[in-house]
Amino acid sequence: MPKKVLFYARYSTDRQNEVSIETQTELGKKFVADRGWTLCGVYSDSAISGTSFTSRPGIQQLLAHVKREHIDVVLCVNVDRLSRDVEHTSKILKDLNFQDCAIWTVEAGRAVTDMELHMRSTMSHELVEQGRTRTREGMKTAVRKGKASTCLAYGYKLSQQRDELGDRIRGLRDIDPEKAEIVRRIFVLYADGMSPRDIAQL
C-alpha cells in the first residue's frame, strides 16, 4: 500500500538564499510522485523563523492532521524546515513518534533518525544564537558611533552625508525640522502632566 504523506514547507526571512514555498512544494510533490506515494496534504509557514513554534499555524495544522488521520510520512526539503529549536524539535518528534509517523527529507532521500534531527536542530540553534549575538554587538557599535542601530526614531531623517567615494554613509541621521517641532510639543505636553494616551489622541 502506498505511503500516505503530508508535506511541510517553511520560508524564513531571517536567512539568506531561502528556497521559496513554491519551489519546496514542487520538490516535495515530485519526491512523492516518483515513489508512487499518496500526498494527503501540504502545509506551510511563510516569513516565519524556525525558532518560532506557537506562531506557526502551518506546523500546528500538520500535527493536528496527523492526530486525526493515519499518516505514514511527514516530508520536508530538509530538517531545518521543521524547526531550528531544540525544544520545538523534541515536541514535534514526540507528537509524530506517538502517531507512528516517520520524518523524511528530500535532501536525505530517506527517513531521518531522531538523533539526526536533534543534532541538526542543536547546530541550527547555535548558529541562530551566534547571529543574534553578532546583531546585538553590531547595534551597540552603531550606537557608540552615533549612528541609528535600527529604524529611525520619529523626528529624524536619513542623513545624506557622503564618504570620500561619494556613497551615502549608512546609519547617520539628521533632525527632521517639521517632525522635530511635534516632538518638542510632545515633551512640553508631557511635562505639563498630560498622559501619553491623551497626547496620542490629539
Image: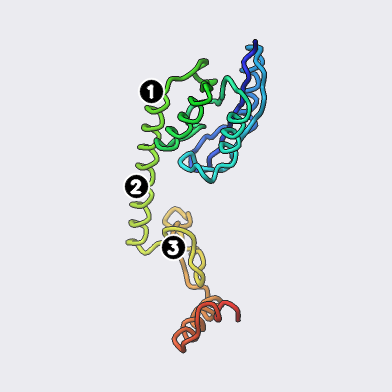
Residues 16 and 43: in front is 43
Query: On the picture, is 108 further left or further right than 46?
Result: left
Residue occupying the point 58% across, 19% down: 72
Residues 43 and 92: in front is 92
Residues 81 and 171: in front is 81
Residue 40 x, y percent position in the rendering = 67, 24
Tell me: residue 200, above or below residue 76: below
Residue at numbered disc 3: 172
Residue 45 x, y percent position in the rendering = 59, 39
Tell me: residue 140, above or below residue 133: below
Tell me: residue 138, above or below residue 82: below
* Residue 36 disc label: none
Residue at numbered disc 2: 133
Q: Callout 3: few (<14), some (14-19), or many (20+) C-alpha neighbours within 10 Å? A: some
Amino acid type assigned to the residue bearing label 2 in the image: Thr
Mark 2 secondary-structure assignment? helix
Amino acid type assigned to the residue bearing label 1 in the image: Met
**Do callouts 1 and 2 mark residues in contact (Cβ within 8 Å)?**
no
Tag 1 or tag 3, which sits nearer the N-term?
A: 1
Q: How is the image coloured?
A: rainbow
Mark 1 secondary-structure assignment? helix
How far is mark 1 from mark 2, CA to CA?
A: 27 Å
Tag 2 or tag 1, which sits nearer the N-term?
A: 1
Residue 8 x, y percent position in the rendering = 58, 30
Q: Callout 2: few (<14), some (14-19), or many (20+) C-alpha neighbours within 10 Å? A: few
How far is mark 3 from mark 1, CA to CA?
A: 48 Å
Q: Select label 3 or label 1 by which is in front.
A: 1
Residue at numbered disc 1: 115
Residues 21 and 104: in front is 104
